């Protein structure tokens, strides 16, 4: 599969970055992961808007205009077999310089873009639902920046892996922030809820998308703080991310999620949103 590094197309396995790259030394960079369905990019403008916000927070100038990014993505995607869904991974670091914390001026940013097969949920995972655990969110306080410094997220995910679970839901000061690599939603009294975007968590591209889908479906959707104590009593819990799309959570800290006949099973709001999401993929990929 092809890979783009600083103006050159080549093979991913052959791509090399100098060890003095600030991405390697400091984690001084940002990234995006953009879904590609049948060679068509999904919600790419939202991803490039967020990339722009992340770069601005780091005071790195966006290396390309929007059309240049799109041309670059299209040239990579043109090599793909149409059948396989892919994710475009893109990363921009501040560049190569002698080590020192202060931001050097006038660096050439390092730009890496490659595609990889989408790590989609399996049909069994969609049928049975995912299992999640909760853990304290001890990451830094700028979760809104899509930083390549992901140690906090890596340690958080491993909490789930160590317990045979799929994802870790992070709790800060008694409130839900997000998953280690996903946004988290609950259903209560027929309404879909997720914490409002702010500095504590990443505003997923799917946060706006789910709000739009809820509008279409006539499902109430509110952005408001979610207390940790609301999780065990939620009717449904959902995750969203580029690769998970919208996913049902059916076990939380080893207990089944939901009530009555639907306890431990994917719920009706999930089912509606999943269907609407598949429709949006067909209609909104460019
Ligand atoms: N939060 C975190 C920490 C993430 O890594 C991701 C996945 N990129 C998300 C939320 C979901 O964002 P998106 O819908 O844009 O994939």
Image (tube, rainbow, N blue to C red):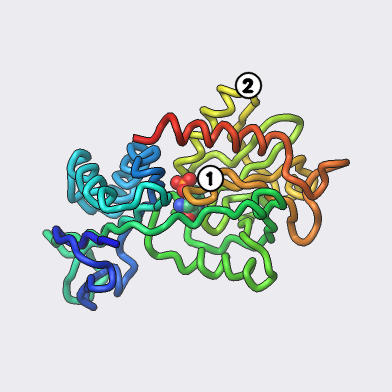
Query: At x 55% / y 29%, what residue is drawn?
Result: 213
x and y, in percent, of residue 19 in the image:
23, 78
Is disc 2 surrounded by few (<14), some (14 to 19) or many (20+) residues within 10 Å?
A: few
Secondary structure state at the residue bearing disc 1:
strand
Q: Nearer the viewer, residue 55 or 7?
A: 7
Quarter the N terminus occupies: bottom left
Mark positioned earlier in the residue sequence (2 or 1): 2
Q: Is residue 124 above or below residue 233?
A: below
Secondary structure state at the residue bearing disc 2:
loop
Q: CA distance from mark 2 to mark 1?
A: 20 Å
Q: Which residue is mark 1?
A: 245
67 horizontally vs 34: left or right? left
Q: Is residue 116 above or below residue 204?
A: below
Q: Choose top left, top right, bottom left or bottom right for residue 113.
A: bottom left
Q: Nearer the viewer, residue 31 or 78?
A: 78
Is disc 1 surrounded by few (<14), some (14 to 19) or many (20+) residues within 10 Å?
A: some
Query: At x 46% / y 36%, what residue is drawn?
Result: 281
Q: Which residue is mark 2?
A: 218
Q: Residue furthest right?
A: 260
Whether ligand 1 has any atom under 8 Å from the Cβ at mark 2 is answered as no
x and y, in percent, of residue 214 in the image:
59, 27
Q: Is residue 143 visible to us here?
A: no
Query: At x 43% / y 29%, what residue is drawn?
Result: 283
């Amino acid at each position: 599969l092809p890979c783009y590094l600083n103006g050159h197309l080549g093979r991913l396995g052959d791509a090399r970055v100098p060890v003095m790259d600030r991405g390697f030394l400091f984690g001084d960079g940002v990234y995006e992961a953009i879904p590609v369905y049948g060679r068509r990019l999904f919600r790419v403008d939202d991803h490039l808007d967020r990339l722009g916000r992340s770069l601005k927070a780091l005071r790195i100038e966006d290396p390309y205009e929007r059309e240049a990014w799109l041309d670059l993505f299209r040239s990579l995607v043109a090599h793909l077999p149409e059948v396989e869904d892919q994710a475009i991974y893109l990363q921009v670091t501040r560049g190569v310089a002698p080590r020192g914390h202060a931001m050097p001026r006038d660096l050439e940013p390092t730009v890496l873009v490659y595609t990889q097969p989408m790590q989609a949920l399996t049909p069994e995972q969609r049928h049975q639902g995912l299992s999640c655990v909760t853990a304290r969110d001890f990451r830094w306080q700028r979760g809104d920046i899509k930083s390549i410094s992901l140690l906090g997220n890596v340690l958080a995910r491993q909490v789930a892996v160590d317990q045979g679970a799929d994802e870790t839901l992070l709790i800060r000061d008694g409130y839900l922030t997000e998953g280690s690599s996903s946004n988290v939603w609950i259903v209560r009294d027929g309404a879909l809820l997720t914490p409002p975007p702010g500095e504590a968590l990443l505003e997923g591209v799917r946060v706006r998308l789910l709000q739009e889908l809820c509008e279409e479906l006539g499902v109430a959707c509110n952005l408001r703080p979610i207390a940790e104590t609301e999780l065990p009593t939620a009717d449904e819990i959902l995750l969203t991310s580029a690769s998970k799309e919208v996913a049902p959570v059916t076990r939380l800290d080893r207990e089944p999620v939901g009530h009555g006949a639907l306890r431990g099973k994917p719920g009706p709001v999930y089912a509606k949103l999943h269907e609407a999401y598949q429709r949006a993929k067909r209609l909104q990929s460019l």
